[in-house]
């Protein structure tokens, strides 16, 4: 069975107590019912947290851009302007929900939902810690790639349904950009899957260690290049600057969501910010050691051995450390994404396609072959191991 | 119970999507219903433990085929004449009552014939109890690289051919100045 | 509930819908939609049989190849459709009758 958040909490005494309570109440074995409740609760928490992160993303974006441009940024609502995103949300809800007369109202309604659903569905396999992952599917990363491609459909349909020239152009650019850049992204992911020997998030992360030299990023030169290929291509896939051609303000008013107002527009924006988070999380999980904490603190074994702590509490502490490690790395990458956006000018369409098809895709293919050869030549040993002859835990199987 | 719920939802999505494709008069909407149907099929795969196949279904269809279809609907959405080369009125592109009736009748007859042929196989099938769902990724990898290596290579050649063929076909010819 | 019979019924419904779409529509892209439905029903059958009858992995391989073929068919077919539209300004099947004369 896949390890899930339910199987993690099933180790605790409280879970068993709740199961016993419901079993007495219903008269049948309530384990699956309690697991279901737990899934519901955790999914709600994750979606709420992600919506907050998406909202805070807009705040962070403004603050960081202001910082880069020597301004103050939002500073009126709440301490340091922190509540700005709530104010924006209220503004969005209060706005009139307009459907243009010539729009295809069914598709117009469904397009932002497709974007949001695609992004939220990917959250099911994001590994926040060894215990706190909604479901560690066997095909985790592959599932994530498949679900993320729904966003492209949503953007395309949003552009089409608006029945406006700008939205149409933005939607077409968005869809062609997304399906083009999916190729280098998938090839880079495939290279790491080859390195780790599995597609589930657990396998991908357990092939790495807590210290930087045990990360896949420094496993071999090909993986090092692969990280940058992945990051650039994933940036393009999320339509972030310098690849934000679908919503280029200077040419297309604001691209595929020109005609959208109110909450529907907010759905597009939210989907974009959460997708950036997902992309950063995948980069962390694949290349930067995921949730691993140095010195094996994450398993909590050291607390049990040294202090004699209760096993479950030690595990929980370990998991919190892991969440901290994962979130720190992910948010650092998030910062880089925003930094890039406010530093680099936008590409042209032909430059965008040239970059994808003439540079990133061949490099990603080269990396794939290179990693395959590396795994065969050195039997999966990492560069660090080869140089220092240490018998560390770095490397694959 | 969990699996049953998932199965019912997926089956409803699949069959409902397929019927909506048949029902819809708008090609763009039909593409979306087709997407829903594909997702239903992916769910059906997941219910019987074909996890890799379910993910492949989502990647290939949601990310590739449906977007291609939507693109080509958009690229070919220009004006179309209502009159054919004999000056007679053409059947509308999404069919009319006559074609729908013909299609329904033809598929009904085809269904009866197929069911008649299949009946003997279905009747003699004794249901085996469902086995537990095992991870399939590793087994598929092993089988693809050993037993089915020829088919694998042939399909890769087919993909390459399709890639080059599609690029060559859809590229506009250069005007020859002769 | 989850049995070979129900899977065959679903795949049958998909197949019938696909055939009906292929016959009823006169738009080439819509006919391609019907073909996709039929290919999916075939793939579903393979997976169902491999699960409920012989329990090996060959049906999955077969379905994978069907997906590959469906992708190829969509790419080449839509390429042809777009080329045809450039030449004839139409995607109506009845217009593709140059060889009939």
Image: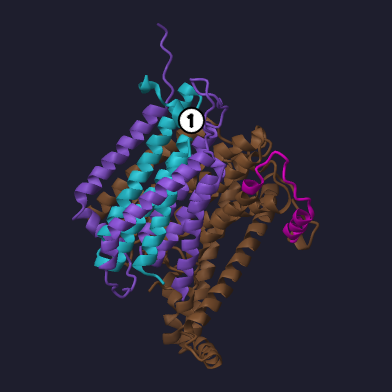
Chain colours: A brown, B purple, C cyan
In the rendered view, does A212 fall on the left or right side of A45? left
Q: Which residue lies at the image location 48% right of the left edge and 54% below the top edge?
A: B37
Decide which of A226, B7 is in the foreground and name it.
B7
The percent position of residue A130, horizontal first and vertical second, equals 45, 72
Magenta residues, start to end: A83-108
Decide which of A305, A216 is in the foreground and name it.
A216
Decide which of A258, A196 is in the foreground and name it.
A258
- Compared to residue A250, the image places residue A14 above or below, namely below
Q: Quadrant of residue A252?
A: top right
- Compared to residue B168, the image places residue C16 above or below, namely below
In the rendered view, does B116 fall on the left or right side of C82? left
User: Which element is circle 1 on?
Assistant: loop
The percent position of residue B40, horizontal first and vertical second, equals 46, 58
How many marks on residues?
1
Residue A230 visible? The answer is no
Chain letter of the residue beneath label 1 in the structure image: C
In the rendered view, does C35 fall on the left or right side of A148? left
The percent position of residue A52, horizontal first and vertical second, equals 65, 62
- Magenta stretch holds residue B8: no
Quarter holding the C terminus of chain B?
top left
Name the outermost residue toward the top: B178
Q: Which residue lies at the image location 56% right of the left edge and 26% below the top edge?
A: B82
Q: Which residue lies at the image location 23% right of the left edge and 59% below the top edge?
A: B142
- Compared to residue A290, the image places residue C74 above or below, namely above
Q: Quadrant of residue A38?
A: bottom right
Decide which of A156, B29 is in the foreground and name it.
B29
The percent position of residue A135, horizontal first and vertical second, equals 46, 69
Residue designated by label 1:
C91
């Amino acid at each position: 069975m896949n390890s899930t958040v339910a199987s993690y909490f099933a180790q605790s005494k409280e879970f068993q107590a709740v199961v016993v309570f419901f079993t007495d109440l219903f008269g049948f074995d309530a384990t699956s019912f309690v697991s279901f409740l737990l899934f519901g609760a955790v999914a709600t928490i994750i979606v709420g947290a992600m919506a907050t992160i998406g909202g805070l993303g807009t705040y962070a974006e403004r603050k960081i851009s202001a910082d880069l441009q020597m301004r103050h940024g939002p500073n009126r609502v709440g301490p340091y302007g922190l509540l700005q995103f709530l104010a924006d949300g209220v503004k969005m809800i209060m706005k009139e929900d307009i459907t243009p007369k010539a729009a295809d109202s069914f598709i117009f309604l469904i397009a932002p939902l497709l974007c949001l659903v695609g992004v939220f569905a990917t959250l099911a396999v994001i590994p926040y810690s060894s215990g706190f992952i909604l479901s560690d599917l066997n095909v985790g990363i592959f599932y994530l790639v498949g679900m993320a491609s729904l966003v492209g459909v949503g953007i395309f349909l949003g552009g089409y349904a608006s029945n406006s020239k700008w939205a149409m152009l933005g939607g077409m650019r968005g869809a062609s950009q997304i399906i083009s850049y999916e190729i280098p992204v998938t090839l880079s992911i495939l290279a790491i899957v080859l390195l780790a020997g599995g597609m589930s998030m657990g396998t991908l992360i357990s092939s790495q260690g807590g210290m930087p030299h045990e990360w896949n990023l420094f496993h071999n030169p090909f993986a090092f290049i692969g990280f940058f290929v992945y990051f650039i291509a994933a940036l393009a896939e999320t339509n972030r600057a310098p690849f934000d051609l679908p919503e280029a303000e200077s040419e297309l008013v604001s691209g595929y969501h020109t005609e959208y107002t109110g909450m529907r527009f907010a759905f597009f924006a939210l989907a974009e910010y959460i997708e950036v988070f997902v992309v950063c999380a995948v980069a962390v999980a694949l290349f930067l050691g995921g949730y691993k904490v140095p010195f094996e603190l994450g398993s909590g074994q050291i607390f049990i051995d040294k202090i004699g702590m209760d096993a479950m509490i030690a595990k929980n502490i370990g998991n919190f450390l892991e969440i901290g490690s994962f979130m720190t790395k992910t948010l650092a990458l998030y910062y880089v994404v925003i930094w890039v956006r406010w530093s680099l000018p936008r590409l042209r369409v032909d430059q965008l396609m040239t970059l994808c098809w003439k540079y990133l895709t061949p490099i990603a293919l080269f990396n794939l072959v290179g990693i395959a050869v590396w795994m065969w030549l050195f039997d999966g040993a990492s560069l660090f191991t080869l140089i220092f002859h240490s018998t560390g835990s770095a490397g694959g199987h | 119970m969990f699996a049953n719920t998932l199965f019912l939802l997926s089956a409803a999505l699949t069959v409902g999507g397929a019927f909506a494709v048949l029902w819809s008069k708008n090609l763009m909407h039909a593409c979306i219903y087709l997407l829903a149907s594909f997702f239903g099929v992916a769910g059906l795969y997941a219910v019987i433990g074909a996890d890799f196949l379910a993910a492949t279904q989502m990647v290939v269809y949601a990310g590739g085929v449906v977007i291609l279809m939507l693109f080509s609907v958009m690229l070919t959405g220009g004006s179309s004449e209502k009159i054919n080369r004999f000056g007679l009125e053409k059947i509308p592109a999404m069919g009319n009552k006559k074609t729908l009736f013909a299609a329904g009748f033809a598929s009904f007859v085809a269904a009866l014939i197929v069911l008649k042929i299949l009946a003997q196989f279905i009747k003699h099938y004794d249901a085996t109890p469902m086995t537990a769902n095992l991870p399939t990724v590793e087994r598929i990898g092993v089988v693809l690289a050993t037993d089915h290596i020829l088919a694998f290579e042939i399909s890769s050649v087919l993909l390459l051919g399709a890639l080059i063929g599609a690029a060559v076909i859809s590229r506009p010819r250069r005007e020859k100045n002769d | 509930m989850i049995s070979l019979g129900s899977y065959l019924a679903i795949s049958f419904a998909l197949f019938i819908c696909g055939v009906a779409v292929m016959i009823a529509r006169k738009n080439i892209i819509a006919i391609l939609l019907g073909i996709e439905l039929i290919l999916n029903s075939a793939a579903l059958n393979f997976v169902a049989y491999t699960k409920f009858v012989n329990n090996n992995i060959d049906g999955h391989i077969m379905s994978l190849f069907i997906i590959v073929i469906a992708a190829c068919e969509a790419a080449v077919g839509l390429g042809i459709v777009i080329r045809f539209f450039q030449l004839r300004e139409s995607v109506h099947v009845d217009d593709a009758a140059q060889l009939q004369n």
